[in-house]
Image: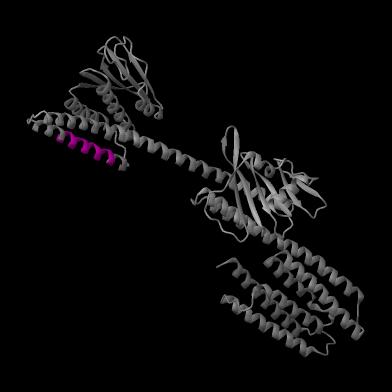
Amino acid sequence: MSEEWIDLRLVSIMRLMLASSALMVTVVDPPQAQANIQAVYTVLIAYTVYSAIFYILSIRYSNLVPARIMHWLDICWFIALIALTNGTNSIFFTFFFFAILVASFGWGYSSGLYLTLVSAVLFTAVGLYLGRTDQTLQLNRVLLRPIQLLILGYLISRWGGFRINLRNQLQLLKDVTVLSHTRLGIDRIIASILESLRKFYDADACLLLLPAHETANQFTYQVYRVRRGTHSTGASPPEISADAAELFLLPWPQKAVIFSKGRSGETTLFDVDTGELTVSDSAVADKVASALETTKFLSTPVHNQHRPMGRLYVIGGPQAYNSSAIHFVLQLMDHVTPSIENIRLVDSLASYAADEERRRIARDIHDSVIQPYVGLQLGIAALAQKLHAGKTDVINNVEELLELTNQELVELRRYVWGLRAGEERRDVLLPAIERFVARFSSVTGIKVDVHTRGKIEVNDRLAAEIFQMVTEGLSNVRRHALCNDASVDLACRGGKILLQIKNRRTGMGDGYHGDLGHEEPAVFKPRSISERATLLGGETQVTFDKNFTMVTVAIPL
């Protein structure tokens, strides 16, 4: 059940109690010297029945009569009772405060104040008319009671309006909290928050400037803007340069601004740090108002970790902005800015992670898929040369290529399964390297020895990366080193896993990029292996001695 219906039922039952109590009191102790006592009873009975009917309607959740006009109908009943019972001396004078309370706490300051003014005018008019006709005018009551009604009615209206405003502020904070934790995308979240703020102040528009990214030591700014009567298109907000944003950032980074062209050419500044209100010349604010096509606005700085990073504008609307509005908007932005920054950070990290994952898969495809198929291509080319030469004893070569193809399909399926698998197994690295080395030696004729020192247990992700380094390293040995043997050494030592791929130097094409005929090989680092090691927090070194070229990778566990 909504709060509005709960309040309506409460007001209805209180009205019924007020009417029935007034009827019983009048029956027990009728007003003295009343010639029209029967009319008083008639009005009280009618008012009681009226109250009972609307109480029943409130229980049934009926809106036969809009709740916003019920207090105005109450005023009509009260005026009738006062006119029938001694005018300004009537005991029903205090009933006005019931209607004012309902209007103020149900619909806000304006409703309560209007009802107070109308009640005071009607009460005074009825009192003066009746006092003139029956010569019982008591001037002190005619003057004092309307003043009492105006003063107390004004206070009730102010407190009721404050209560309504506070409830709406809490609801807005709740709404923007929910919005800032959704995954609609940062642009839609900010646009929704701005639209909620615009509706709260019934403003013409809301505008937010936030830094987008830094280029050449200068920020660009994204401009988020919502307007009355328009809907978000979902497009990314436009970006402007720092020079273009300078006008809207204002020369007061730590001050909120209230500007209205009707204020004798002055601008009110509110210091966010000290809470001090000052008045400044409105030349700058007037330029901003012209650029925003408005005659008034409220502007507050937007902070992130106590540093100004942008600015918010609430533009136009029927309300007059004041220091209370500044306090609330500052509180609202302090509430949502950390969430917005967290969402932007998560989005950027997710994009970075996706890019890194695409690069990793690209490297894996290069090392696990493309490299073996290069070997198949070479085998098929050799087979074609035999056939062109007229040699028909190729069945063994075909069977070898078929076996290699089957093995590579098994490895490719294992790789795809590894992308899908969620569990982490820690005993997969060494068997996978041994299977690959056996196939590599049978296809290329290069003998490869695998040595391990200590127990090698790593998770699937790290095992996959090390396996790809081994395949890439041995592929480079086959392509660039003219040798018939190599070795792969694995060890766990000092909180690191050490991988070393070693091949014998022949004096002709040492290493991976050694120049023929040079005594010393060129300094190099295998790019794919180095990239993988760096992403894992490790490092790669290439060393030479008289007989061997060694690529060593150290990765922290």
Q: Position of residue 352 (x, y in %)?
A: 45, 38
Farthest residue toward the left? Answer: 393
Image: 224 above or below 46:
above
How many badges with numbers are in the image? 0
Q: Position of residue 179 (x, y in %)?
A: 54, 53
Identify the residue at image location x=89%, y=72%. Answer: 143
State which quarter of the image contains the C terminus: top left
Q: Position of residue 13 (x, y in %)?
A: 64, 75
The dominant secondary structure in magenta is helix
Q: Which residues are magenta?
A: 402-416
Q: Quadrant of residue 295?
A: bottom right
Question: Could you say which is closer to the camera, residue 523 or residue 335?
Answer: 523
Identify the residue at image location x=83%, y=52%. Answer: 264
Residue 15 visible to an observer of this rendering: yes
Image: 556 above or below 274:
above
Left or right, 446 with respect to 341, comes to left
Residue 452 visible to an observer of this rendering: no
Image: 67 above or below 372:
below
